[in-house]
Structures are given as C-alpha cells and as structure tokens.
Amino acid sequence: MAVHIRLVRNNIKSSRSYGKYFAKTVSQGEVTLKDLAAEACRNCSASTGDVILVLTELEDMLKQRLAEGQTVRIEGIGSFSLRVKSIGVDDPKTFNLGRHIKRIVCRFLLASHRCHDHRISYNFSEGVKTVWQIGAKP
C-alpha cells in the first residue's frame, strides 16, 4: 500500500508560505460502488445486488439521520455530522438564516486510536507508505 505524492509550489503571494513546496497526493484512480460491491462479493457470500442494496440503504439512512441533526458514528470508519458555514454579524438580532447561512457541509472525522507513544493513528492510513509520483520529484 502506498500513497503517491508530488511537490506543489505555493504561488499565493499573500501567503506566509509563498514559494514553499508542499506534498500533494496524486490519485491513482477511482473505484465505484459497483467495484466495491464486486470486491465484497468475492470476499463473502453476498451477491453484488445485496451489497449494493445495503450500501445504498446506508446512504439513505445517513442522509436521514444527518438531516435530523444527529451525528452518525460507524465503528472502524469514523463519524459524520452536518455543520453550517455562515457570515458573522455584529448583533444577534440581525442574523437572518436565509442571508447569513452560506452552506451546509458534512464533516467526516476518521476513526482513530492513540498509540503507545501517545501519537494518534488513523485507521485508514495505518501502514500506508508514501512514494514519489513518477516524474514528479523536482
């Protein structure tokens, strides 16, 4: 398992880190719900249709529970909750939902645990190494 990276220069002149290079991940492709369902079928006795049905129902349940204002925690994966992005106002009496709420976003916090050396280890990145993307190293 490896995550491919390349270096990208910060070209934002107003930034304190202008001109510095930062590591950026390079996607190695994309998998779809059907791809995951097919893989799950190879690993268990469920059919592709069954897996797709369950994952689609999970999506519907997530939407419903989030819309009800609940945080959804899936052990081993993480937690989902809705947050609002808004414009600040000087006086609470002048706050208007339609004008000052700019968008609603879904926040995802990856499942994690604390290691013996007190570092936090994130479940999905455990054991993953980084490699240079071919031709991307300056």
Image: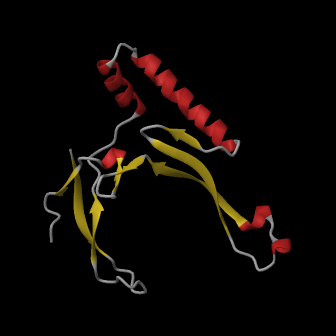
Indicate left or right for 21 with 77 as reference: left
Residue at 52% x, 45% y is: 79
Residue 112 or 49: which is nearer the viewer?
A: 112
Q: Position of residue 87 (x, y in %)?
A: 69, 71
What colour-coding does the image apply? secondary structure
Q: On screen, 127 above or below 36? A: below
Q: Is residue 41 left or right of residue 56?
A: left
In the rendered image, residue 89, in percent from the top left (x then y), is placed at 75, 76
Which quadrant of the rendered structure holds the N terminus? top left
Q: Residue at x 22, y 63 (%)?
A: 6
Looking at this view, name the residue that lies furthest to the front. Answer: 116
Q: At which x and y percent is residue 91? A: 81, 78
Tell me if residue 31 comes above or below residue 119 in the rendering. Answer: above
Identified at 35% across, 37% down, the residue is 31
Please tell me how many numbered marks the rendered image carries.
0
| Quarter of the rendering occupied by the C terminus | bottom left
Of residue 93 and residue 31, the one placed in the foreground of this image is 93
In the image, residue 51 above or below residue 95? above
Q: From the viewer's perspective, is 118 left or right of 90?
A: left
Q: Residue 24 appears in which quarter of the rendering?
A: bottom left
Q: Which residue is at 78% across, 62% downward?
A: 97
Q: Nearer the viewer, residue 115 or 27?
A: 115
Q: Position of residue 136 (x, y in %)?
A: 17, 64
Which residue appears farthest toward the right when viewing the image?
A: 93
